[in-house]
Every structure is written in structure tokens, then in C-alpha cells.
Amino acid sequence: MLGFMIQRLLQALVVMLIISAMVFVGVYAVGNPIDVLISPDATQAIREAAIKAYGLDQPLWKQYLDFLGRLVAGDFGRSFLYNMPVLDLIGSRIPATLELTLVAVLGATLLGVPLGMYAGYRPESLASRLIMSISILGFSVPTFWIGLVLIFTFAVQLGWLPAGNRGETATLFGVEWSFLTANGWKHMLLPALNLSLFKFAMMVRLARAGTREIMLTDTVRFARATGESEFTILRRHVLRLISIPIVTVFGLEFGSTMAFAVVTETIFSWPGVGKLIIDSIASLDRPVMVAYLMLVAFFFIVINLLVDLSYAALDPRLRTRRAA
Amino acid sequence: MTALLAVSDLATHFATRQGALKAVDGVSFSIAEGEIIGLVGESGSGKSVTGFSILGLIDPPGRIVGGSVKLRGRELVGLPARDLRAIRGREIAMVFQDPSATLNPVLTIGMQMRLALEAHGAVGEADARTRSVEVLARVGIPDAGRRLDAYPHQFSGGMRQRVAIAIALLNRPRLIICDEPTTALDVSIQAQILTEMRDLAREFGTAMIWISHDLATVSSIASRLLVMYAGRIIEEGPVADVLREPRHPYTAGLLASLPANARPGMDLRQIPGSTPSLFDLPPGCAFQPRCERRSDACIVMPELVAVGPARRHRCHHPLAGAQA
Amino acid sequence: MNDATPLARFWQEFRANRVAVGALIVVVAIMLVALAAPLIAPQNPYDLGTLVLMDARRPPGYVGTKGFTHWLGTDAQGRDLFSAILYGLRISIQIGIIAGGIAFVLGATLGTFAAYFGGRIEALIMRIIDLQLSFPAILLALVLAALLGQGKVPLIAALVTAQYAYFARTAHGAASAERSKDYVEAALSTPLAPARVVFRHILPNCLPPLIVVGTVQIANSIALEATLSFLGLGLPVSEPSLGMLIANGFQYMLSGRYWISIYPGVALIVLIVAINLVGDQIRDQLNPRLRR
């Protein structure tokens, strides 16, 4: 187990290095790197001083090493737009994205898995067809358009829910959270719904496909032959068996949902990192872009690692194989 | 004395695109308390479907279309799902062919046994453990107490089948349907399990239907033999009698093809031709295209006629001894 | 029935699903309408000269100064929305097909060759592809679109980068399975050029799963293009695609002028849903595991 973890950690490190190189080439080397480092309206003298100070007259490989050194030291530079250290800026935006994503993915899973299991258990029933139709819509309709329709329906026409912003927040562990206040929930409902629809569709499909397949196996027949109720079979046997792919997707999708939050946050003016990156792209705030990309990459690698480890926890066959 | 189980005119068909597949078509037999009968036939003869039909474990597109299955006089065909469930595992249990497919790979065997117990009334965790350990020890699992927390893949094939048998025995059923339980195992283990099962059945007074394609295996455990061909019973009688004096040409062919009956240096005898497709059965006796004794009379389906108190056969031209 | 060609049999089975047939008709109809947009549309929405500012943001059914009825209303520049949607569909479909096609060719080639060569090369290629697949496509496209700037070529490049990996993995899976089959070994032992074996034997057998991925990915690239345009990272404003039309209408939606965003959205969704329904049916038909 330990050897496996060390191996995975080393792998993660290599991946991080590759990504940092790609980001470096993409953002620093392709564009004019000086734009990244100092504001475009600086004087010529400051520019030249900065070129020297940042070693931009050095060969590319050395520049990359310096870049890496700054990353490791946690120095991502300052945002032009907000004039504050990038790390602080992103740090202040992460909680908003985190809670939105978490609510969306959790909601999608808690609702999608049971419904998908039902659809797989009774594929011909009317309710299952309805569930599948919703899932096809969730898959096909672009997130941003659903967001618009939600705003138009619930905010503009009915006036039940607010169309944007986080609403009131309360402090926990020194961080502002919306989910702690009723008003915050009210603000979070529409964006979370918007963000969760695609994941919901995905969970439904996954649970349905898994259930359909497992219901035909001898494991289920045997369980039935011992007199177990259909509910017990679904809850104890089928759910456990389909949970392996579902946990994987849950993990991986948590990451991609954070990425998709870019769209939802833009529509609902939700002040998270997604909105930040769109704003920084629009205003060429490159330090923020770099930091965001590295952060997302890091995040993804951590998630992949966790998913791999939870595999081992869920599938006893894998556990012994690796321990051996 | 009423029979423990009486099956009469049982018919189970599968709806397919090419029409109804008559997997079981008018099967009748009965079994007394504590009796072990063997159900023999090639794959596709309907022997397994007969077993599943008794427990009502036929998945769509299959359906029991006629006949009756009576357990101590109580009709099982058409029984509501709830009542049928109370009988499964409690009155009639089942052991399947491949234990690695029937046991749930992601649940400990202790949990699987507990689920089987809970299916027939709530049991405490401690009670469940004690009962499980008892039965596991009884089927020959060494160190049963510790093995309760192991997963199926941590057992060898033979041990796994013993676990499945233990689960079937848990609720002390009156009848166990064994669907080729030794086919997937090594020959040496086959013999062991066969003997143990016979002893267990004798000890608990459990009746058994032993389904197999292997005449030799069945003969060593059962006291009475039923031979199936193309969805019907074609011969029935005490094992010793059927082996010594088969009446139906098909049974005779099966016997002749047993390796034990071969002469050294000679080819094994084979039944000419192959099992007919159930979609395309010949008129009358299904065996007639392969039969040496065929005559024009065989285009009419022969009745299952009783000869003497214990023998029945379905043939217009039975072999020697039938005149009695 | 079994004497029919595989294609005819495929069609026969396809026809049995009425929903899928309906969806196919919708897809073909939209494509024809988009193709014939210059002939059908009452106005060329890209010709700024024909736009009348007085007609801007008019509701559906408004009769404009040019004398024709704006059945779906007009946008903020006074464009006839019906015309804009037709032209927008044209761009969306065009970009979806071009990006999907390039990704298809690129991914299929990479995947099959990885499977063909095996060993280190295969491990390296597939590792990179797995890595990329674990990264959300939208983010990749977003960054690329931001780095490369606006325009059709950067947009297509971004979409291809975000999608080729799906084709590569699918092709690799199918090709590996095919590679290990006896007939391929046999073909390789003859003095045929390896490329010939790949193209004549391996690739044709990988086509079914690739076609399935292909339909889904065309729908996806249309959606992705719309999303990027909506975020302001797609095509220039002068040639609005559906996504941009929707984005432009967003601000007016809050004041109740829903039509500018809603109608282009409906067109987009009908197209994507129809493509997905067709793709679903094809997948079910090509998936041997679901066959009875």
C-alpha cells in the first residue's frame, strides 16, 4: 500500500512538472512575458529593469527553472486588475466556488443515483422514461442556456429567487460561507441547480447502466433465491456494486464541475474563481491565469489520487492485489 | 403421504423476436420429504429453467405460462411476490453453478449471510454471527469465525461453493435446488462436495433436486432420476433401474457415451446429430431425428406412460423390459 | 432479412425507433435550412448596411421598416432574429463538423497507431491522452481560446484540442482489441506495409465505436462553441453564432425581452438534442452487450 502511494505521488509530481512547463510555454513564452509581470502602462525604464530583474534576458530553460522556483515559493505575482497578491485573491474566491460545486455535485448524486437505479431496475416503466428524458435534456442542453432560462423564469417572471450574487454570508473557520444563512441558500439555489443538471444527467445514466447490467447477474439471482427483498437487493448488493464507477465519476466530476462553474458563475455573477478567471482572461490579467491553471491542475491531481485510493477502499479485490 | 413438492404440467416460455421459446413445456414430477432426485439433460433441455421456475425466478422475457408447483399442497405459481419471497431461502433454497458469479464480490461473506438471515425475520448481529459460524463450520470451512470477515475472492473455488451452500442451508430449508453446483469445480473437489452434500441432506432431512448434465455425478447422489430433453421429461425412475435398464433411446445413448462404459481402445459412443434448436423442433418426439428406433409413429408426440409403480417414459418404441 | 447488406440491416433496425427517426429528420432538416440560409432568410444579418437601428429589440411579429415581419423579433442591433438564427446555425454546424472531423482524424490516427506500435510509444501517447481526458474540456478550450485570440481558426483549434483525446482513446481501445486478433497477426506476417494493415484491416473495425463518439462529439463541439461564444471567447461580434446571439440577449432578458436569448437557444437545443438522440440509437445498435 505504501509503495503504491509513493509511486502515485511521484507520478503526480511528474504530471505537475509537465503541466507547469505547458503553462509556462503557453502563457509566458508564447505571449510577451513582460506583459505578465508588469502592468502594460509602465515606462520603458521600468520595463527594462523588470526584464533584468526577472531574468528575461536569460535562456528559456533557465527562465523556466526560475518560474518553477517562484511557484514552489508560492509567489504567483500580483494581479494587475485587483492589485493584490494573486494567491490571496484566489484564496478569497475559492470558498464561493467550493460550496457551490459541492452543493451541486452532492445534490446531483443524491438525487441522480436513486433515480438512475430505478430507471435501470424498471427500464420500461413510464417514470423511467421520464427520468431518462430529463437526463437526455440535461446532457444536451448547454449549461449557460439553462442558466438563462432559470433566471428568466424564477427571477424575472416569478420573482421568487434572486438572479445573482452570494447573498448574506456567515463566517466559519474565518471564511465567509453562503450555506450558513437562509438568504445565502436562496441565492445559491438557482446556480447550484444550474450547475448540477449536467452531473445529474450523468449520474442517472451511470446508475441506470450499472443497475441494468447487475440486475441480470447471478449475484442478484442468488440473492433473490435466498429470499432477500428487492429493496434489500438494490440497496445492499446493487448499490455497492455500482458505487465503484460512481465514486470515480463523483471525484472526477467534482473537478470538472468546478471548471464548469466558470459558466454558471458568469451567468449568476457568483463571485468565485470561475468568474475571476473569465474576468482575468478578458482583461489579460496573466498572473491570475497562470495561478488559476496551476491550481486547477494541482486540484485535479489530488482528486485523481483520492479516487485511486477510494477504489482500493471500495473494491476488496483491488486491496489485496495491491497489498500483495 | 402428500409430496413435499409436486410439479405438474409446468410450462415456461420465453418471448423472443422469433416467437415463443418453449424452454419448459409440460413438466411433471414430485419429490418427497428428504428425497434426492437428479434432473439430467443437455444444456438447453430446460432443466435449469425448471429449477428457476419452481422458485419463480424467471426474468422477463421468460414467463411461467401454465401448470402448477405445489409446496406441501400450497400453490406457488401466481403467488404474490411477497409470499413467494418468504418461501425462497426459507422453504426452498438454491445453489448455483458458479460461486464466483453468485457471491457478491464486494461484501464480506458474513454480511451476505446476515442479509440471507434478515430476509426471514430480524436477527441481532451477534445471533447472525453465531448462526453463520455454525453453518460454515458444518459445511467444512475451517476457522469459520475468522473467515466471516473475508471476501469471496479470498476463498478457493471449492470453499466458495461451500460458502454458497452454507448460505442456502442457513434458514434450514426443506428443499434445496442444486443447479450444477459442482460443474465449475476441480474433479477431486467435486467428489468431496458431492459426498458432503449427501450427508448434509441426510442429516437435516432436506430434500434435494440435483440438476446436472453429468449422468455419473447425479447417479452418485440421487435416488431417483429424471431425464429431460427439449423441455420435456422423457424418462423417470429409480437411479439403479434407469442405469441398468434405460427405456428411452436417448437415455440409453447418454449411458453409452459415458467414459466408464467405454471399451479400452474403442471410440466413445456418441448420440448422432445435435440437440435441436427450441425454435425449430421436429414434430412429435423431439428426439426422433437422432433416434435409431424412429418410425412413422414418432411424428405424434408420445405420452409419458407409467410402467410399474416407479418408472415412466415418453417413447413409442421403448427399449427392452418395457413390455412388463 | 439476413441477406440484406449490413447497412440496409442497420437502417431497418434504426427505423424501428420512431423517436430516433424523428430526430434524424430534424437534424437533416436543420442542416438543409442552414445550408440554404442565404436563400431563405429575409435579411443578411452580417451586412451591417441592411440593419436598421430603429427596428432594434422589437418583439416577435413586429413589422419592420423594410416591410417584412420579424416573426421572432429583432436583436439589439436591429437584426431579424429568424435570419440571424439561420446564419448562426450555419456557423455552429460548420464549426461543429470541421472541429469534430479534424478531432476524429487526429484522434483515430493517434489511437490506432499507438495500439499498432505498442510498447513505450503506446504507453507514452496513452498516458498523455489519459492525462488530458482527466482535465475538463471546457477549461482547455477556454485557455486556448484566450491564448490564441478570437476567430474561426483559433476556435476550431481549441475545440479540436479539447476533443481529439476522446477519439484517440476510443480508437485505441478498439484497435488494441483488433490488433491482438489472429487475422491481424496473419496480415502482419505477410509482406504488406504496416500502414496498409492499419488502414485496410484495423481502422475499419474501429469505425463503429468511433462513429458513436463522433456523433456525440459533434453535438458537444456545437455546445462548446456556443458556450465559448457566450463567454465572449468565440467568434467575432460581426458574425454572431448562436452562442453570441444568446449572450447579447442576456442583458435584455432581465427587462423581459426574452426573445433575443430564448429563440436562438431553442434552435441550438433542438439541434443538439436531435443529434444526441440519433447518436443514442446508433450506440444502442452498435453495442453488442445490449443486443438480445
Image: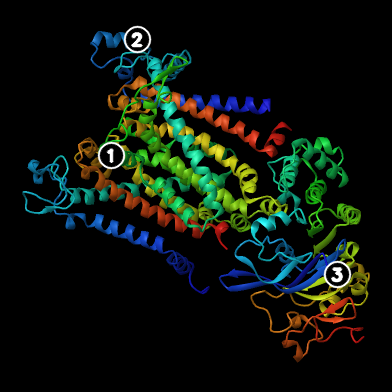
Hey, which residue is sitting farthest bottom in the picture?
Answer: B296
| In-front residue for pair A218/B1 | B1
Is residue A286 shown above or below B124?
Answer: above
The answer to whether the residues at label 2 and label 3 have Cβ atoms under 8 Å apart is no
The answer to whether the residues at label 2 and label 1 have Cβ atoms under 8 Å apart is no
**Residues at marks 2 and 3 on the same chain:** no
Q: Is residue C276 left or right of residue B196?
A: left
Chain holding disc 2: A
Number of residues whose C-alpha sits closer than 10 Å to that of mark 3, classed few (under 14), some (14–19) or many (20 or more) = many
Mark seen at residue A52: 2
Q: Which residue bears the numbered disc 3?
A: B225
Kindly identify the residue that appears in the image at 59 percent across and 57 percent down.
C187
Q: How many marks?
A: 3
Q: Amino acid at mark 2?
A: Lys
Chain holding disc 3: B
Q: Amino acid at mark 3?
A: Leu
Q: CA distance from mark 2 to mark 1?
A: 59 Å
Is residue C15 shown above or below A159?
Answer: below
SS at mark 1 in the image: loop
Image quarter of residue C258: top left
**Residues at marks 1 and 3 on the same chain:** no
Nearer mark to the viewer, of 1 and 3? 1
SS at mark 2 in the image: helix
Q: Is residue A166 left or right of residue B238?
A: left
Chain holding disc 1: A
Mark seen at residue B199: none
Residue B150 rendering spot, x and y as whole percentages: 76, 38
Q: Is residue A56 left or right of residue B14?
A: left
Nearer mark to the viewer, of 2 and 1? 1
Mark seen at residue A158: 1
SS at mark 3 in the image: strand
Residue C231 rendering spot, x and y as whole percentages: 30, 34
